[in-house]
Image (cartoon, helix red, strand yellow):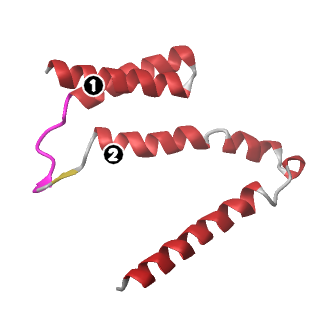
Amino acid sequence: MSGQNVWLMMGLAGLATFLTRLSFLGLVRSDNVSESLRRILRLVPAAVLAAIVLPATFPLLGESGLAAGIDWPRPVAVLIASVAAWYTKNMFVTIAVGMAALWLFRWLF
């Protein structure tokens, strides 16, 4: 694939992503959304965060097939971040505490 085709595909993918998001964010008025849909949409950030964190914490496959073991600092950092999330209910604090715990355990051990 030539360089021009790569840029064209990237541009089309970006446009498709923009139009998809615009259809939900720009074209739907907030007063038209039902209360049940609002309750469901409030859970989306937690679901997305779980979808990103869990596979990175507990990998199913390693380089040679099934993972031989679990990288123990990751689950411990997730546990510490979960406690921070429970108490603070703040996503930025949760991410900061989790990353600090992970970096600390990697540095110490």
Residue bearing the label numbered 2: 55
* Label 1: few (<14), some (14–19) or many (≥20) C-alpha neighbours in 10 Å: some
Seen in the picture, residue 42 relative to 31 is either above or below; the reply is above
Residue plotted at (86% across, 53% down): 29
Residue 19 in the figure: left or right of residue 93: right
x then y, percent, for residue 78: 35, 27
Residue 87 seen from this side: yes
Residue plotted at (36% across, 85% down): 2
x then y, percent, for residue 35: 81, 42
Mark 1 against mark 2, which lies toward the viewer?
1
x then y, percent, for residue 56: 31, 43
Residue plotted at (56% across, 76% down): 12
The residue most toward the top is 87
Q: Quadrant of the C terminus?
A: top left
Which numbered dot is residue 103? 1
Seen in the picture, residue 41 relative to 94 is either above or below; the reply is below
Q: Secondary structure at mark 2?
A: helix
Q: Quadrant of the N terminus?
A: bottom left
Labels 1 and 2: the sequence-earlier one = 2
Residue plotted at (75% across, 43% down): 38
Q: Secondary structure at mark 1?
A: helix
Residue 61 in the figure: left or right of residue 25: left
Asked if labels 2 and 1 touch by Cβ distance under 8 angstroms, the answer is no
The residue most toward the front is 4
Q: Is residue 11 a member of the stretch shown in magenta?
A: no
Total numbered circles: 2
The prevailing secondary structure element of the residues shown in magenta is loop
Question: What segment is highlighted magenta in the picture?
Answer: 64-72
